[in-house]
Image (cartoon, rainbow, N blue to C red):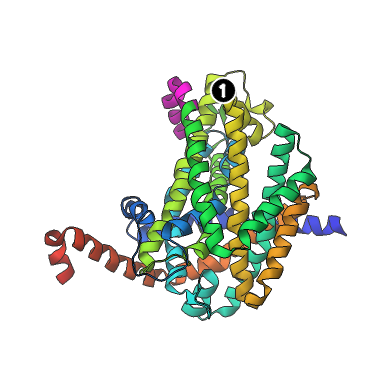
Amino acid sequence: MFDVIGKLIKEVNSVVWGWPMMILLLGTHVFLTIRTGVIQRFSITKGIPFSVSKDSGAEGEVSQFGALTTALAATIGTGNIIGVGTAIALGGPGAVLWCWLTGVFGMATKYAEAYIAVKFRVRTKDGRMQGGAMYALERGLHMKWLGVLFALFAGFASFGIGCATQVNSIAEVCKMNFGIPAPVVGIIVAGLTAIVIFGGIQSISKVCEKLVPFMAVFYILGCAVILCMNYDFLVPAIKTICRLAFTPGAAAGGLAGSGIHAAMRYGIARGLFSNESGLGSAPIAAAAARTRNPVRQALVSSTGTFWDTVVVCLMTGLVLVTTIMKNPQIHMDSVANGGQLTSLAFSQIPVLGPVILTLGILCFAYSTVLGWAYYGERCVEYLAGQKVLGIYRILYVAVAAIAPIAALDMVWLLADTLNALMAIPNLIAVLALSGLMAEDTKKYIHNLDAREHPGRNFQKLQE
């Protein structure tokens, strides 16, 4: 019976995460980039400063930075470390470029979905702000049934991709590096998770505000050290990545391109999995931010994809490719998986290299557990009200406790499938409401520009 169910889930997964879904997501990224007038330029110049400033007098539960770090906690995970290695192992170095491009264009989709989440958010009876694709579908498009489907998919996915698989990764790392038994790890992680998530979004955001910057800077510094050690191979690596993204071929150090098809497939897939642009998860956190204007928070949220994929995934890719080119004895055929490849790269730093990698994986995985706990809570509350939150939290903590000793192959496939199914109603909302989003964006950006350069923009605003 279980074999039949597992086979069915696997077949469904191969369909929902096939080329049609990747084309739909990437096509949406490109379309929204054009529709917003290349919003990425404002995400960098305005979104980053906004993320560390306060929107005084605005309504919301957490700061804009708190909402951003909560979303980043869920998206920056083991995929940024091990996943990039897997993409290179299967798709060749060219996969790094496709992963990076997915992040660049994905910023527009993350902007658009955050905009509709804040635009159509609601205030609960006890004063909390809630939003996301489910509220946008219900209030913006009057399609509550589709909002219910999104909430169902996301709620169930939180137990798998947000909790069980992440805790399992933590247990494997702790057992391999510290000899800690898996059941003990499960109990410890479950306890730490309970302490945080039972405090609600304020507690989660406070932890994420401290954990996310620490783990990101710590990991990026480790990557920077390796890139300095591999300095002579940095420019050749960039050239190789660009060349093998479009053509098959060979390069130094056992690197070989798998052709444009494989490079695109694994690079795009890893980019989409990494930053979750288009899935509709991160905007749930954005809706809780203290902000007066949905465009402002959308700009802040779009920087999440920038940090996650454009920066972190790119640095991981450069570290791995330069390491392989520097060490010809490393051949892709002999590398079992992305984790092994990444371990080889970080082992170049004496003593501290494995520590940086291990701590990075632990922090990235645990932060994902916290971020997805909030996503799941909001979806469950949308479906059944606040009275079920206690039950959800208890179940979430229980899953964290048993994950290290459970067989997760079927859980991973099911959660991965639900992730893809989340994207469908979310993209319907984003695309259907893109006209309203584009209009508000144009007004806000023009007014913002006018305040900064009144003489230059007065004529434009009067027209």
Q: How many numbered marks does the figure carry?
A: 1
In-front residue for pair 235/134: 134
* Residue at 52% in and 74% down: 135
Residue type pointed to by label 1? Gln
* Rendered location of residue 305, percent (x, y): 46, 51
* Residue at 62% in and 64% down: 376
* Residue at 47% in and 73% down: 121
Is-magenta flag for residue 236? yes
Relative to residue 194, is residue 252 drawn left or right? left
* Rendered location of residue 123, percent (x, y): 48, 77
In-front residue for pair 308/183: 183
Point out the residue furthest to the right here. 1
Of the 4 image quadrants, the one containing the C terminus is: bottom left
The residue that disc 1 covers is 348
Magenta range:
226-243
Relative to residue 194, is residue 328 drawn left or right? left
Relative to residue 75, is residue 172 drawn left or right? right
How busy is the neighbourhood of tag 1: few (under 14 within 10 Å), some, or many (20 plus)? some
* Residue at 71% in and 69% down: 391
Tell me where residue 81 sits by quadrant.
Answer: top right
* Rendered location of residue 373, percent (x, y): 62, 60
- What SS does tag 1 mark? loop
Tell me where residue 201 sits by quadrant.
Answer: bottom right
Of the 4 image quadrants, the one containing the N terminus is: bottom right
* Magenta span: chief secondary structure: helix
Look at the picture and state if 425 lies above or below 341. Answer: below
Residue 81 visible somewhere in the drawing: yes
Residue 11 visible somewhere in the drawing: no
Is-magenta flag for residue 242? yes
* Rendered location of residue 196, percent (x, y): 61, 57
